[in-house]
Structures are given as C-alpha cells and as structure tokens.
Amino acid sequence: MIAVEQHRVALAGGALAVVLHVPESSTPAPCVVACHGLGASKDSDKYLLLAAALPAAGLALARFDFRGCGESSGVEEAMTIATRVEDTEAVLDFLGRHPRLDGRFGLLGSSLGGFVALHVAARRPGLPVVTWNAPASLTELANDDLEDGRGLGVPFAVEYASGRYALAPRGVPMHLVVQGAADDVVSLEHGVALHEGAGEPCDLVIIDGGDHRLTDPAHRRRAVELSREWLVRYVTAARSPAGSA
C-alpha cells in the first residue's frame, strides 16, 4: 500500500504544493524528490509513473510544483535557477522533519529540473541524483530556443548574464545521466558532457530513439526502471541525512 499526502511548504509570500507518496510497508523510508522542467508540473505522467514505481521498491517519492507552476503560488516568468534551487531545498528541509521519512534523500530531475537538481546536489554533498534529458549548458535556453523559451522572463536573463548558473556543476557523484538519442531539444551532446563532468560513481544510459519528453511508453518505462535501480542502490546506501547548504 502507498500512503498519499498533500502538503503546502511555506515560502516568503507564498507556498509550494507537494504530494508525498510513502510506502506503508517500509516506514520510515528514504525519499526521492522529483524536479519538473519548464512548462511542466508535478502532475506530468512521468512523475505519476515514478510515484508508483519508487514506493513499490521501498522509496518514498515527493513531487512538487516550482513557484509559478501547477498548484504553487507565484508566476513562472519571475522565476530563476536560484529560486528553483531554493524551492527544492525548501522541500528537502520540510521533508527532513517528516516522521515517516528517515532523512535519506535523492533527487530526480527532467530537463531544466535535472539542471536544478544537479545544483542542489552540488550544494548538499551526499545526494544521489538522476537526470533525464538535462542540459549541461543554458546557452540555448538563454537564446529562447530550449523548450520554446516557455517560462522565461527578465529575471532569468539577468541571472544568466551573470554567469552564476550558466553551466551545470561539475564533480557531482552518484549521478545517473539518462539521455534520449533523438532528443531535438536537449541534444545527446549535453548528456555526454554531463557524464564527462560527473564525479564517480556515474553512468550514462542512452535511450535509442528517445525524444525529449520520452513520449514512447517503452522509453519512459525504461527511464523509470533505470532510475529506480540507481536510486535504490545509492539512496538506501546513504548513512546520514542530507546536510543543509
């Protein structure tokens, strides 16, 4: 059985909508926090698949909406990478006090959500991370090419110009890179670059024919299976709760 909980995580001037799926047979449980991309939400099909697959393997899953998305407050055009990092860390801090979780965490992010997850993992050593079709660089995004420029605004452009979040961080260990070979939004070169820049242990799995959204159900199932195996291996092996930034 899986227990499903709805939460609101308070922020200055608003709140984040979080849905937590906890395996009732193994609590307290380790938890994976899922980070969505631009123009998406916690209710995208891929996160609903993960919400069934991970608890079945003994891992809780938390899916949430970034500020300005889904059921969270705010306007997406006002958001930046920094605010998305803050949102993810607020969710981690909130869940770190949850009585049905044991303090061990991992991250999974798709597209820009994977880029954000890597920055959070770089700030909080010990967090395993899985990325699906995540960019290694935001050059295309800054040029309004990546994901058709949805969700972008002046704050993002100013942040990118500063160079602070222009590139994915290097040296993040326990990183599984899942990359669609036919992704015409975030090309295969990004996945290769993320793998080359990762710390050990790391792995790159290329899904032949996979597009950016892993639209083919078989491709999506494969990504879920790979992610589950990686996260079970490394999240459950963690010995202490994730530290704060």
Image: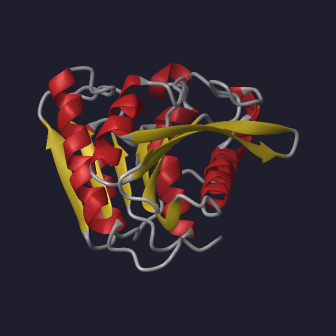
Image quadrant holding the C terminus, namely bottom right
Residue that sits furthest to the right in the current view:
13
Image quadrant holding the N terminus, namely top left
Horizontal and vertical percent position of residue 193: 31, 54
Compared to residue 126, the image places residue 182 above or below, namely above
Determine which quarter of the picture holds residue 239.
bottom left
Can residue 211 be seen at all in this image of the molecule?
yes
Along the line of sight, the residue nearer the viewer: 136 or 7: 7
Horizontally, residue 178 falls left or right of residue 207, namely right
Q: How many marks?
A: 0
Horizontal and vertical percent position of residue 195: 28, 58
Which residue is painted at 33% across and 25% down in the image? 213
Can residue 167 be seen at all in this image of the molecule?
no
Which residue is painted at 27% across and 20% down in the image? 215
Determine which quarter of the picture holds residue 109.
top left
Residue that sits furthest to the left in the current view:
208
Which residue is painted at 61% across and 63% down in the image? 96
Compared to residue 170, the image places residue 166 above or below, namely above
Which residue is painted at 82% across and 37% down in the image? 14
Horizontal and vertical percent position of residue 48: 39, 30
Horizontal and vertical percent position of residue 8: 71, 39
Along the line of sight, the residue nearer the viewer: 190 or 210: 210
Colouring of the image: secondary structure
